[in-house]
Image (tube, coloured by chain):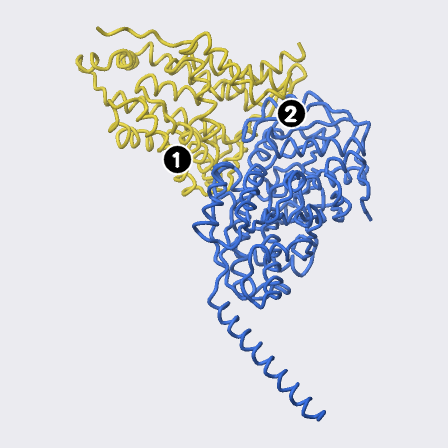
Amino acid sequence: MISSKLIGKTRGGLVSMLAAASLLTLAGAAQAQETFKLGVVTFLSGPAAESFGMPAANAAKLMVEQFNKAAAPAPYNKVGFGGMKIEMVLVDENGGGAKQVQELRNLYQRENVDAVIGYVGSGDCLAVAPVADELKKFLVLFDCGSPRIFEDASPKYVFRTASHAAMDNVSLVRYLKSHNVKVNTMNLINQDYAWGQDSRGDFLASMANVYPQAKMGADLLPKFGAGQYGTEVSVLGGKQADITYSSLWGGDLQGFLLQGAARGLFKDTTLVLSAADHVLPGLLDKMPDGSIIGARGAYGILSAKSPINDWFQASYQSMHKVLPVQAGYRMTQAFMGVKLAVETAMAKNGGKKPSPEQISDALRNSTFETPGGQIRMALGDGHQAIQGTAIGRTRYDAASKRVLAVDVQTFGAECVNPPANMKSMDWIKAGFPGAKCN
Amino acid sequence: MQIVFPIVIDAVAYASWLFIVSLGMTLVFGVLKILNMAHGSVYAIGAYAAATAVALAAALGLPPAFSLVAMLLSAVAVAVTVGPLLERGLLARYYGRDEVVLLLVTYALFLMLEDVTKLIWGVNPYYVSEPAQLFGNVLFAGMRIGGYDLFLMVLAAVCGLITWYVLNRTTSGKIVLAVIHNPEMSASMGVNIQRVYVVAFTVGVFLAALGGAFTAPMISVQPGLSVSVIIISFAVVIIGGLGSIQGAAVGALVVGVARSLAVHLLPEIELFSIYLVMAAVLIFRPEGLFQSVKARLI
């Protein structure tokens, strides 16, 4: 009796297993034919293309190639996204917020993409986030820095897999303090738009905590893409300061550095730059030695050695012949976050292509390893990432013809990012309560 | 006095750069009545060509001072290649149409040249700071002035004086002025209008390319150069009066002074200052400061 029951149970179990195996095989066959269509939006033209857009696009191409060949290291070593080959639709971000809203609708409604990864510009991120939510489509912001996206709203289908800009300035100020950099006077030069204004605000608020005695000399706000900085150099040169802080980037930063160096501006002040790693391969010996720089994450020459970073740097250099810089890292971590989220969601729904809701549920509050370190979706109800970062000083190495980072200090995610229950500016102004620094 | 000197020097340095670029734009409008939107693209092409020429000169082992000659030659090369091609190949087909049509044609050209530039030189930046480094800097009245800035002031003055001299003191210049004044009458007197147009447009292209070429050592040459230049050049020629060389000079100075004052004294309004000045001028002089007197044809 017992044995017949056992046999019956065993037979039932075998039947169930066979049925499940058949279903999985069918699902696998379906996956083999199915693709995951992914919209990728970044600057392919315009002033941000060289610094951010193209490195990001290059990283996206690399990830598609590596993932589709299952050539990435574990846990990213399945083909494509959960067996589905990735089909990328690359869109130019140039043209402003209104155009990007239209392009995003096109991607979802005409191209029928399953997800979108994109946007360098904070203005573009702020413009497109409500559209993705309205259409109930999955969107990952990979680069833009404005904290407002998840501090002023709570989008359901929108995520950002990189830290926002508060981290950059908090870590710079912590670095100055821990390296005993004397700051009694400071000059500032930032672009007169969202990024420059937000960065300036975060830096000044952080300085007020750590260096309350520091007095501001010049506080300049040239327009985005000004190109000519002769007048600004005069003003900065006329107000001697211990440090000169800037969140300039791309061609603006390069132009400012070239014009300032030609007039000897950087001989008597230490440059403190929040997002400067991407200009180093072009500037080389024209970059003033000893400048304190950030890369908006532990990226490029500031990144820590790890197997996954070694793989990324080697693959990127093999494909594009240059060391990856910050935007490439951020694009890569967005791809990795989405890949794991899609695969986690598929594991829960019997291997079928997941819906935007299912991918969102999987990415929310998740943690994953990337070339730039660990990413934790810890803020904005699990939609906004925090990560560690690194700051260092530049030194041109004539032998290798590269700018190296020396005196690099890394900061843990919870040391330089606000806790989940606070807005970044409130956290900075309150003196970084709850910060966990080693 | 401590603040006045830097404000004046910075204003003149900025105005010099602006004048070189705006001079070509106002000349083309004066002769051909074309508000050339592609002027900024030619400026960018000039910058890229200069970057390439300087690198080539260095690769050939020529002395560093030759880089200045290389920049000048690159501007000439751009002018003789692009100028006649655009004027004869494209713009000439639209003469006689409404001015707005020509504006749209040059705008389309601007968009296409953006892509052509990207096609040829890519999106990566080019640096040619070596020519600027040749001049070093000068410490004067407590202010460190870039030698290259002083050189650009001289270059702007030379460009302005040569243009003025050719137009007002030579037979060829007087023919151009006659064409500006009345093309039909000039044609009936035997003036080859087509030749005047192509030469004037090529000189305009040369000045734009020259501006780009001699700006290249101060900046990172990369996509996006043309947009900012075209906007500010428009502001200059509108303030000065379209088609007026004196107007371009005064307009550039007005913009230079406004910007310098704003950056030194009130940085928050720098972005707005140029347009504030432009609005103020246009309220009192809707056709600009130096709009030339037009004879009424019966």
Q: Which residue is mark 1?
A: B111
Against A192, is A338 above or below?
A: below
Q: Position of residue B183 (x, y in %)?
A: 24, 15
Q: Position of residue A368 (x, y in %)?
A: 67, 57
Chain letter for the residue marked with disc 2 in the picture: A
Left or right: residue A25 compared with residue B196: right
Say which of A197 and B238 sits in front: A197
Type of the residue with mark 1: Leu
Q: At numbered mark 2, what does the secondary structure look like: helix, strand or loop?
A: strand
Q: CA distance from mark 2 to mark 1?
A: 32 Å
| Crowding near the residue tagged with mark 2, few <14, some 14–19, many ≥20 C-alpha atoms within 10 Å | many
Which chain is assigned blue?
A
Say which of A203 and B130 sits in front: A203
Q: Which residue is mark 2?
A: A220
Q: At numbered mark 1, what does the secondary structure look like: helix, strand or loop?
A: helix
Type of the residue with mark 2: Leu
Against B8, is A394 above or below?
A: below
Residue A317 can be seen in this image: no
Say which of B64 and B224 sits in front: B224
Q: Position of residue A328 (x, y in %)?
A: 58, 49
Against A87, is B41 above or below?
A: above
Which quarter of the rendering shows the N terminus of chain A? bottom right
Chain letter for the residue marked with disc 1 in the picture: B
Which residue sits at x=47%, y=12%? Answer: B250
Which chain is assigned yellow?
B
On the image, which quarter does residue A186 sit in?
A: top right
Left or right: residue B226 compared with residue B1: left
Which residue sits at x=72%, y=43%? Answer: A392
Which residue sits at x=28%, y=6%? Answer: B295
